[in-house]
Amino acid sequence: MTDQCYSNSLISINEALENIRAALLPIKDEETVNLHEALDRVLAQSCIAPFHLPAFPNSSMDGYAFNSPDIKNTPFNLEEIGISWAGQPFTGKLSPGQCVRIFTGAVVPAGADSVIMQEQVTVSEKIIHFPNNTQEKQNIRYIGEDVQQDDCLLAAPKQLSAIDLGLLASAGIYEIRVKRKIRIAFFSTGDELRAIGSPLAAGQIYDSNRYSLTALLNNPCYSVTDLGVIKDDKSRIHACLLAAAKSNDVVISTGGASVGDADFIKEILDEIGQVNFWKLAIKPGKPLAFGRIQACHFFGLPGNPISVIATFQQIVTPALRQLSSLNNNTPLRFKAVCQSKLHKQAGRQEFQRGILIQIESGEFEVISAGKQGSNILSASSRANCYIVLAREQTNVEAGTEVLVEPFSLFL
């Protein structure tokens, strides 16, 4: 059986993404931020190591530093002549038969080339008893072992992780150049929409889409403006789009991208922009608008709540990453055994909401999160993944392997 919404005019997500990729150029503007503000920002200029990391040979554990020629084929003793603390090096030099107490991160003293763990020796006052089979040249971090001076620490463009910030800090780099934030405005359209807290008349609903989009756009790379709800009034929508396009890189609307009598988005954009209207071969979501209003990119998403979320994640998120100069836009997907029977008609790629678990053997299993209508927020709230079903796939029997796309790395 074929999806009733199927037609030859539907285009795939991949086709839509290819068209969008061809139309977008990364933002070139940069700004300087310090490391406290840099998490998840996109590095605009590569960072070069100003010195070796480590900058000096140091111990990887607490123990005793000694020189390997002192090793015997039997247990042996060395005299402790001092201590090398982290930040307070031992300043002398070892002679044959001597060792130095050393702590993790402390400078390895001159004349030493090995460190033994403190648990492997016994101590009698200043005499340290070393065991048989003591290993030479162990437990030392050497100069430049991690990074050599003038090496590239981090190459642009890169979205900066907590580990990246630690690496930069270890090299004494406090300020960096990053891509400026993408300026994004969004609004909902519809006479039926009301703000939370106001009374509902017959046929009216609370606007949930703007709250979902606020959360989806909560990203350090974005500067976001919520323009509220715009009624189905052509002049108001026209004015809103023109004003938003002047001060933003991207404008996103929800609702009004269909072909109803009150859907003015297409009519307005034909007048003020260059916009494509597509019917996507996906479910949830089908109507989508993409294009430009002056120098601003526009995305017109469907009105149903789950369609908004799905089309944002599958279409808008990769586009925003490209604007930020990030090209690793393929979502993580892998196989899991589906323990529910899934209903599907051929014709559209489906993103059904599922509940994914990892069983004791390490394999993954998934079940349906419940009703899959594009207005059913409760099932999506229970879900932690999409079950991604191919365009021509039909019903899935329980026990069948399916492709899943987790919402996060934690199940």
Image: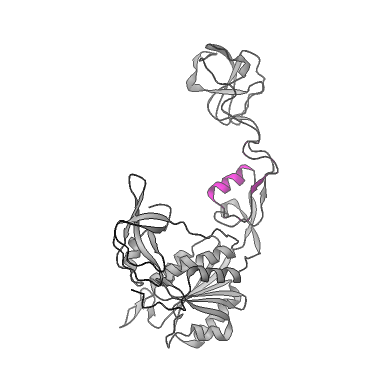
* Res 244 visible: yes
Looking at the picture, does residue 359 appear above or below residue 41?
A: above
Along the horizontal axis of the image, is 144 left or right of 363? right
Characterize the magenta stretch by its predominant secondary structure: loop
Looking at this view, is 331 or 170 the one in front? 331
* Number of residue marks: 0
Looking at the picture, does residue 9 appear above or below residue 58?
A: below
Along the horizontal axis of the image, is 33 left or right of 17? right
Looking at this view, is 218 or 383 the one in front? 383
Residue 284 at x, y = what percent?
39, 71
Looking at this view, is 195 or 10 the one in front? 10
Residue 240 at x, y = what percent?
53, 81
Residue 385 at x, y = what percent?
38, 59
Q: Is residue 55 magenta?
A: no
Q: Residue at position x 52%, y 17% from top? A: 133
Along the horizontal axis of the image, is 51 left or right of 342? right
Q: Residue at position x 57%, y 79% from top? A: 243
Residue 379 at x, y = what percent?
32, 65
Q: Quadrant of the N terminus?
A: bottom left
* Res 227 visible: no
- Image quarter of residue 76: top right
Looking at the picture, does residue 153 appear above or below residue 344?
A: above
* Colour scheme of the picture: one colour
Q: Residue at position x 64%, y 40% from top? A: 147
In magenta, the rendered stretch is: 144-173
